[in-house]
Image: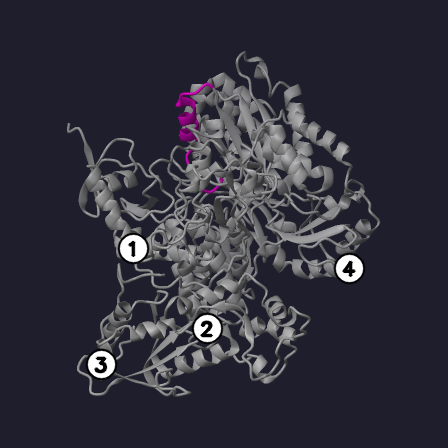
Amino acid sequence: MSDYETFLLDGRPVRFERGQTILEAALAAGHYIPNLCHHPEFKPHGSCKLCTIKVNGRYGSACTVKAMPGQEVSSDTPELNGNRRVLLQMLFVEGSHFCPGCEKSGNCALQALAYDLEMLTPHYAHFYPSRPLDASHPDVLIDFNRCIMCELCVRASREVDGKNVFALAGRGVASHVVVNSPSGKLADTDFALTDKAAHICPVGAILPKRVGFAVPIGSRTYDVDAISTLAERRATEEA
Amino acid sequence: MTKTGKAHETELDRVLDRNRRDRGRLVQILREAQAIEGWIPPETVTAIAQGLGMAIGEVESTLEFYSFFYRRPRGDYVVLFSDNITDRMLGNQAIFEHMARRFGVARGEVSPDGLVSLDFTSCTGLCDQGPAILVNGIAIPKMTLRRADQIHDLIRSKVPVSDWPKDLFEIDHNIRRADMLLGSDFMPGSALKAAIAMGPEAFLTEVKRSNLRGRGGAGFTTGVKWEAAKKAQADERFIVCNADEGEPGTFKDRVLLQFYPERVFEGMALAGFVTGARHGLVYLRGEYLYLLAPLEEKLAELRAGRLLGRAIQGVEGFDFDIEIHMGAGAYICGEETALIESLEGKAGRPRIRPPFPVVCGYRNKPTVVNNVETLCKVTEIALQGGAGYEGFGTKQSTGTKILSVSGDCERPGIYEYPFGVRVGQVLDDCGARSPKAVQISGPAGTCLGIREFGRRIAFEDVPTAGAFMVFGEHRDMFAVAHNFAHFFAHESCGFCTPCRVGTAIQAKIMDKIAAGHATQYEMNELQHLHDVMRTGSHCGLGQTAGGAIADTIGKFRDDYEQKLARKDFEPAFDLDAALARARAVTGRDDADSHMLDHA
Amino acid sequence: MFHVAPTTRKRKVRIATTSLSGCFGCHMSLLDIDERLLALAELVEFDRSPITDIKHCGPCDIAIVEGGVCNAENVHVLRELRANAKVLVALGACAVNGGLPAQRNHLDVGECLTRVYTHRSEGMKGSVPSDPELPLLLDKVHPINEVVRVDYFVPGCPPSGDAIWKYLTDLIDGRIPRLEHPMLRFD
């Protein structure tokens, strides 16, 4: 018996270690599968559904389905990419994503995925949410209108910072992130700029204050390289 | 109504103590805390968080998830109208408007004197005797304008709901066809006795031989589930009875809980006997609050009769007891992992599976979640053996199935049939004169048209959790799907993108069609949305949320087409209405300040 | 999808352009195609456009719309272009998703108007203008695809001259127009 096992991703064999999810194995092998709520340091979340794949003909989330020998996985297909584009469009219309006015532009995973999947229009009628901003904290600003409910800040604050500053409340489209303080304001928590949660937001919902255009638009991470190219390159470097 | 700070604090302390200051009981704590003032003020949230050692946001996360928890003051009388399509067909909207007019209060609002608040709520499980309402959580069926006036007067005179005439609350069982389960007498303890005589292993073999499959709709084999929980390595196991009968159009569990509770509880004890679980939990949907007291009484009775508690029937080591948890208005909690989250005091967001509950469920221990009806069926197997049971129904769907029949028929109610019964047979039996369609297993199920009435109720053909809603030839199937679209948008837990956003977009598109402002463009959009939700959603809710629309478009396209504008495209919003605010501020009313033509 | 013209065309492609609730930045970006403007002039002629100052649109092949829809006049202009063009292109962030003007959408338009026109400093008293000549504001600013059917979208604030050139020449030459990294940008 060989010391590794493989599954097939879009026809190519991918090696994996027992216990890895399909997404982990694919990323490690340098094969990009679009994802938003996934973060290598945290347990699978499975909420954004960008990584939806087909495993032996059945739909599943690459970030939660464990890799098994002999699986036939399809990911980079017109159907799945088309559905991913719709999911991105849903996130764009649900929130308020005005890229030209956002300091995260060029470093934003939502935007980068939209580039990668060639999303040219948000397509659906906009929801125009009116969620309040929280600028109470001296060092960090939160624009909840940009939140995509991935709960990375919730997870980072609980699991890494040990502070439990955020929680997801509400239901359905009324879902929203709340701040754990009697006032509901970030200033009344022990949140700090050095927290993991201050830097984990994949979009521009949580931003450090007084930082702007340190890197000019046009030279930022995903302006230079596509998010898929970057992920693939990272895998090669780590290998 | 506001109680003084001190009194409130004492009462809240009592609530926390009664619940052992266990954060796992947060849903129960919030329910009891809300009873103090009728809503949950911010100070209460803070106090609960402190009392349980939780973050405020964690309490809010649970609090904001459930429809029956209120963060703003409600009326002393909270009147909620069940808004399933069957309630609508029985005229609930006219009665709602009548009551709203009499109280002078708008939907979702509280009357200025704080006396009453009125709103709609998802199906309350009284479809065979609707329209139904809940008053301070207690169900009243068969609403009429006359009843609305009577209730109006009672509220105006501030009569406590407990003193209202008893006939208002009378709920019929409406059992129209009884078979194996509903038609047989049951002596409490007899099933346990038989199982004990067999021993747990042999009884499990019988359950497996019966090929009993879960009656909640998914149809997983009960014996296999029990065996998995039994074999899982753990020091503790749980049996959960899923009594969160939230699927609109389903009400058979309500009848079983009200009229056959000893069967349900004994089924749970049997599951405990086989798996070695010592704790049973009933998750009772909030809408069935009126069943709580009688069920608690029944539990006390069974304990007294040594059918629950320590050393059941004198068998040393066979300890099993049952606790009832109330839900608080969230359809998603019928999904077993969401239900477990709710039992643990959290928002009901479905977990990632695997691991499955039989391995890692309630408090991360092996947990069997069975439907109310399944648990009743287990008592039959104990009494007559797996082989005897197997003879009923079809090969893949053994035994009988209880259907909740409602809608356009002369005899709505409960019908028990052996599996394999044809849809047409049920329609004949319930007196459906000229049915156009049947929605089977609720909004998440299947819509069948006339040509499909020869199909059979069975896991291998038309599976069902029990709902059987009949629509007569005069019904508009678009209106049916429109009602369902709003139901799903309201009940989506919000965890995953396709369901959270997709159900909202879908409901808006259906509104646009209803308003006569949609075109073929929207018809295509609906189909595409359904594909994305079906293939990408985290759980069954999102996966099926577009199903009824797809079915009705496929089978009753005319009901949609006649509402479409004969145009290439219509704006996403009402242009003229969008100018109203500026018209008002500028005081203009000239021709250019309007945009009435949707050219 | 629509194709504007076969590759061996006899006549020039007729283009109309307009800026609704936008800043004309996208039109400026069009001029950024620099010397390729001369090549473009060989391929196209302009109908209604800020370039020609023609006020109303006649039948044309491509309508290019910059800006979102913020008032009643925007709606009329947009519909005129849609009715006359074979192909309608949304050019730039505002046309595609409302852009900067749509950042007012969480505010009440009535309150905005009152605040701007009546709450003046130094004792000046004003009133909200009510001249029928003035276009009336919609309560929210919308991307153009919420008002008319749109065939193609070129995002960017503004889209680069290269992106516009690529997209337009794809269209004119009958190819399915496509924008990829790094030409596809939202900022």
Disc 4 secondary structure class: helix
Q: Which residue is mark 4?
A: B102
Q: CA distance from mark 1 to mark 4?
A: 65 Å
| Residue B407 covered by magenta stretch | no
Q: Which residue is mark 1?
A: A219
Q: CA distance from mark 3 to mark 4?
A: 74 Å
Q: CA distance from mark 3 to mark 1?
A: 30 Å
Q: Residue furthest front?
A: C122
Quadrant of the rendered image containing residue B209: top left
Asked whether the residues under the numbered discs 2 and 1 touch, taking CB atoms below 8 Å apart as contact, a structural biologist would say: no
- Looking at the rendered structure, the kind of residue marked 3 is Leu
Instruction: Write the start and end of the magenta stretch as one range.
Output: B215-235
Name the disc covering residue C21, or none: 2
Residue depicted at x 58% and y 79%: B594
Name the disc covering residue C38, or none: 3
Vertical placement of residue B553 versus A212, above or below: below
Whether residue B484 appears in this view of the structure is yes
Tell me residue B154's x, y (percent).
81, 49
Quadrant of the rendered image containing residue C94: bottom left
Q: CA distance from mark 3 to mark 2?
A: 28 Å
Q: Earlier in the sequence, mark 3 or mark 2?
A: 2
- Looking at the rendered structure, the kind of residue marked 1 is Ser
- Looking at the rendered structure, the kind of residue marked 4 is Arg
Front tag of 4 and 2? 2
Tell me residue B311's x, y (percent).
57, 14
Neighbourhood count class around disc 3 (C-alpha, 10 Å): few under 14, some 14–19, many 20 upward = few
Dot 1 and dot 4 within a common chain: no
Q: CA distance from mark 4 to mark 2?
A: 47 Å
Q: Of residues B344 and B189, which is closer to you in this image?
A: B344
Front tag of 2 and 1? 1
